Image (cartoon, rainbow, N blue to C red):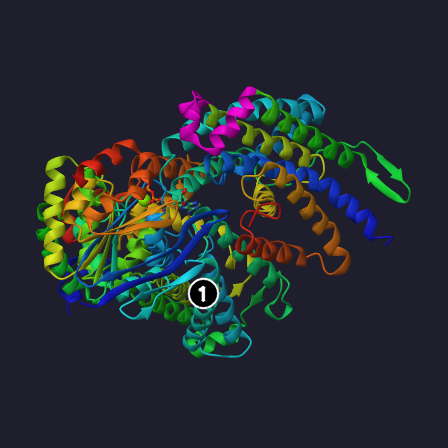
Amino acid sequence: MDVLLPSLVDGLLIGFVYGLAAMGLTLIFGVMDVVNLSHGALIVLGMFGVYLLYTALGLPPYVGLFIMLIAGILLGMALYGIAIHPLLGGPHLSTLLSTFAVSMVIIGVGTALFTSTPRNIDFSLGAVQVGNIRLLGTRVVAAFVAIIMAVGLYVFMYRTHTGKSIRAVANNRDAAELVGIPSRRILALSFGLGTMLAMVSGGLIATLFPFNILSGGVYELKSFVICVLGGMGNPTGALLGGLILGLIEGFVPVFMPVGWTPVIEFTLFVIILLVRPSGLLGAR
Amino acid sequence: MSVILEIDHVTKRFGGLIAVNEVSFLLEEGEILGLIGPNGAGKTTLFNCINGVYAPEEGRILFRGHDITGKPPYAVARMGIARAHQVVRPLNELSVLDNVTVGACYGRENLSLGEGRRVAEEVLEFVGLAEKRDVLAGKLNVAEKKRLEMARALAARPYLLLLDEVLAGLNPAEVASMLNVIRAIREQGITILMIEHLMHAVMNVSDRIVVLDYGKKIAEGSPKEVANDPKVIEAYLGDPELALSLLEEGK
Amino acid sequence: MRWLRDPSFWVSVLIVALAGAWPLVTGSASGREDMSLILMFVILASSLNIVLGYTGYVNFGHIVFFGLGGYIGFYLISQMGWHLIPAAIAGAIVTALFAAVLGAIILRLRGAYFALATIGVNEAVRALIVNWDALGGAVGMTMNFKRYQAYGGPMNALWVAYGLMIVVALLSVITSYGVRTSKFGLGLLAIREDEDAALVLGIAAPKAKTIAFVLSAIFPALAGALFFFKNGNIEPGDAFRLHMSVEGIVMIMLGGYGTVLGPIVGAATYERLRGYLLTSPIFKDLQLAFAGVLLLLIIIFVPSGLVGWLRNRFPKVRRVLA
Ligand SMILES: Nc1ncnc2c1ncn2[C@@H]1O[C@H](COP(=O)(O)OP(=O)(O)OP(=O)(O)O)[C@@H](O)[C@H]1O
Ligand SMILES: [Mg+2]
């Protein structure tokens, strides 16, 4: 119990950040039926963005995050125009490959500029002691930021006109166009939001763990697992999926070698795809 | 004449909606049976039950004496039931000839690729698509796609052909030529079950008619009997245009 | 035999056979290594094309077959002392059985769901092997040099493995051709275009898809056994590299999705291009980014690939380019 509780709490805190990353992936899938294979590269972009602003300009990571938020939306909308819009309506393969191509470009340029040496943001907020659990300050703040972002997204999607338009386009693009929603702009914005979520969560992860230009792949795979746990296209589910994944990662190492975590995660992933393709929350 | 298809108290539900409700009727070998009813009556759903796309919750379907209820669609196709869909489903990136060859090769006779091609060429000639054989199916116009749908079903050399609104969306000249094709198919001894909204056409070409409304069979008989049946007129009053044309056919 | 009178059969087979034979003629070891890599890509791309190009199922986990065949073959040779050929065949058989079971389960999923499941399978298998101590765990296994004595020493063993690589490449291309021009292949194409319509037309899609999946698994498994035998060591990261599956897809797109010749042309072009970019002073650091831009341009502007484009543009060449 002494080991279990702290690692579960830690897992939960990180789970919020994972969940935030996955929300970006699942939002894009839900709105335009595109599996964004540049997700991992965008996460890395967020990591390096925050890192560079911190090391080069001395901007605190949480200010850097805010810049990533804006840059993410703009970049995502541009990427939509280049790599998604011309291919919508075609076979799935086209957008799978075009987003993968985007990832190759980002990682390629990134490797040329930064090589693959590990980096970490040398930034600490100390630790808080709750009972006999010691929590790192950066983890608490990261979870807190992730929760705020998730709530913000929820309010945006359910309370604003633009957010409602996004949901309408997700439900039925043709019908949405009939009632006068400019689907192209809405789709671009959705891709922008998805990108923004990836980059912000990348920035948060950078405050927690060391990373390098190739780290995106790991978090992309985690995001897939989370999306499937929560139901592809369901942002609320993604948050829940993130927590489950965080818990698994906190839980498994207590009982068996840490190497078994991915075996369990990916087996669970495939099984859920097969038996509950709409996720743990979704209807059968 | 013998019974080729027996629909016995078939029920299909979608959640709370009963799309097909205890429907029963017989189909004699060699006849053309028209299946009519207002939009949403359950006609297409009944087809889906017959050829195995859906498994009905209740009831049985017998084809040439075999129980085919709940069999997968490919097994049903192999036994000799072919179908033309209401919404055409061409294999877009394949040529017209290849589309029809698929029908021939995987149909009742289980032909080899070479034999299948030969049958496909014949059938394309028969439906009047021969000069389009090398065109990609996705590039055809609507009328041609309907013919292709029909050709593919015919190439399977079925005992029973299910036609779902093959006349919809065609202009009068195209309708007339399609009707000729349908009659010629019957001449070959193929039994036809056809869904149709175009009253004059279905009344004209069918031997008997079954009427569905809200999933239930409400009438069955010769075209004349059906057209004069008050229950049928009533069902169609929701659809005044059809009711009117029904009344006209009756006179 | 119908095949032997078909020029497009000979075009595909001769390209592979002649290119493969060239290093045997010159005896150049570096030529052999380059060509070995191209042949391996031909095997990966041609076999993947059966599932991806003919059947329309996007498989990101194709490399799992390569890794499994590689591990089984390597284990049998290095730990059990088997000869390369029976070891490779045993690896292929086990991998095919794995594919049959896996296919029967996951081919129920369609579209993006299938693609995601294949990623999950590859990662799960990789993670499993990392934890499998008998197979060397995360470090993998290394071949004892003495094992190469049976093939006339390490140098000669490389030539033996290369010769077998040519054979496997030819077999995979012939299989690809055989499937593409058969009734079975026509059924697969129908599934690719519209699976529900194909079912109604009488195609037993679940069985056909599984057979296609198994066929596509055999050749990468053989190639994996040969590659890692040549390589002298095997580790999970090399055997189950997700990136290589995607490279296979890129090769198929480059050459022409759903054609026999496309994956061959695509594999060769990709390997040459990559080789050029890696050595060119301007692109050396940017080769990945450059390949990404290229891929994007192909998908948007030439989605049917080189061979597909030629076939559409000049219908006359269809007789020669299948
Ligand atoms: N897959 C499905 N899921 C849920 N409901 C369905 C499904 N297919 C059909 N329905 C419903 O079942 C009812 C019958 O539909 P069906 O398509 O059989 O009608 P139809 O008689 O062919 O109509 P139409 O003349 O318009 O083609 C309709 O209310 C329809 O909405
Ligand atoms: Mg209908």
Task: Say which residue appears at 53% left-offset and 72% top-offset.
Answer: C75
Q: Which residue is mark 1?
A: C99
On screen, B131 above or below A208?
Answer: below
Q: Is residue A88 visible?
A: yes
User: A80 or C63, which is in the foreground?
Assistant: A80
Q: Give residue B146's position: percent from left, percent from top.
A: 20, 44
Instruction: Please indicate whether residue B149 sits to the left or right of residue A202 in the image.
Output: left
Q: Position of residue A127 (x, y in %)?
A: 84, 36
Specify the segment rendered in magenta: A161-185
**Most prominent secondary structure in the magenta stretch?**
helix
Asked whether A46 or C200 is in front, the reply is C200
Disc 1 packing (10 Å; few <14; some 14–19; many ≥20):
many
Q: Quadrant of residue C108?
A: bottom left
**Number of numbered discs overlaid on the protein picture:** 1
Residue A136, position as x, y percentages in the image: 81, 38
Residue C272 shows in the view: no
Q: Amino acid at mark 1?
A: Ala
